[in-house]
Image: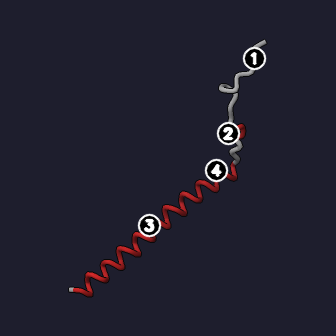
C-alpha cells in the first residue's frame, strides 16, 4: 500500500482558504486600486488648480 503524500493531494482548503476569503481578497485589491486612483486624481486636480491660480 502506498503512503499518503500530502504534496500530491493538496488543495486550497488544506491551507484554510475558502471561497469567501478569496473573494474578500479580490474585492480588497479592487477597492485598494480604486482608492489609489481616486486619491491620485484628487491630488492631480488640486495641483492643476493651484498652478492655474498662480499663473
Height in image: 31 above or below 49? Answer: above
The quadrant where residue 52 appears: bottom left
Location of the C terminus (image quadrant):
bottom left
Residue, x 31% and y 83% (percent of image)? 49
Q: Of discs 4 and 1, which sits in the foreground?
A: 1
Label placed on residue 37? 3
> At which x and y percent is residue 32?
52, 62
Question: Mark 4 or mark 1, which has the lower sequence index?
Answer: 1
Q: Disc 2 to disc 3, how far (Cα)?
A: 32 Å
Residue 21 picture location, percent across and down: 67, 52
Q: Taking 23 as reference, is 52 left or right? A: left
Q: Which residue is mark 2?
A: 12
The Cα–Cα distance between marks 4 and 3, rounded to whole angstroms, is: 23 Å
54 in relation to 3, above or below: below
Tell me which label, 2 or 1, sits earlier in the chain: 1
Pointer 1 local density, CA inside 10 Å: few below 14, some 14–19, many at least 20 = few
Badge 1 is on which residue? 3
| Residue tagged 4 | 22
The earlier-in-sequence mark between 1 and 3 is 1
Say which label, 2 or 3, has the lower sequence index: 2
Q: Are marks 2 and 1 in contact (CB under 8 Å)?
A: no
Q: Residues within 10 Å of mark 2 (few under 14, many from 20)?
A: few
Relative side of 38 to 7, left or right: left
Q: CA distance from mark 1 to mark 3?
A: 52 Å
Q: Whole-Å distance between the Cαs marked 2 and 4?
A: 10 Å
Task: Answer with mark 2 or mark 4, whichever residue precedes in sequence.
Answer: 2
Q: Earlier in the sequence, mark 4 or mark 3?
A: 4
> Going 64% across and 56% down the picture, which residue do you hit?
24
Instruction: Give the quadrant of the N terminus.
Output: top right
Q: Are marks 2 and 4 in contact (CB under 8 Å)?
A: yes
Which residue is depicted at the point 67% across and 39% down? 12
Amino acid at each position: 500500500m502506498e503512503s499518503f503524500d500530502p504534496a500530491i493531494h493538496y488543495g486550497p482548503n488544506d491551507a484554510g482558504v475558502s471561497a469567501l476569503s478569496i473573494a474578500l481578497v479580490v474585492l480588497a485589491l479592487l477597492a485598494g486600486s480604486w482608492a489609489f486612483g481616486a486619491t491620485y486624481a484628487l491630488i492631480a486636480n488640486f495641483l492643476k488648480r493651484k498652478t492655474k491660480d498662480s499663473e
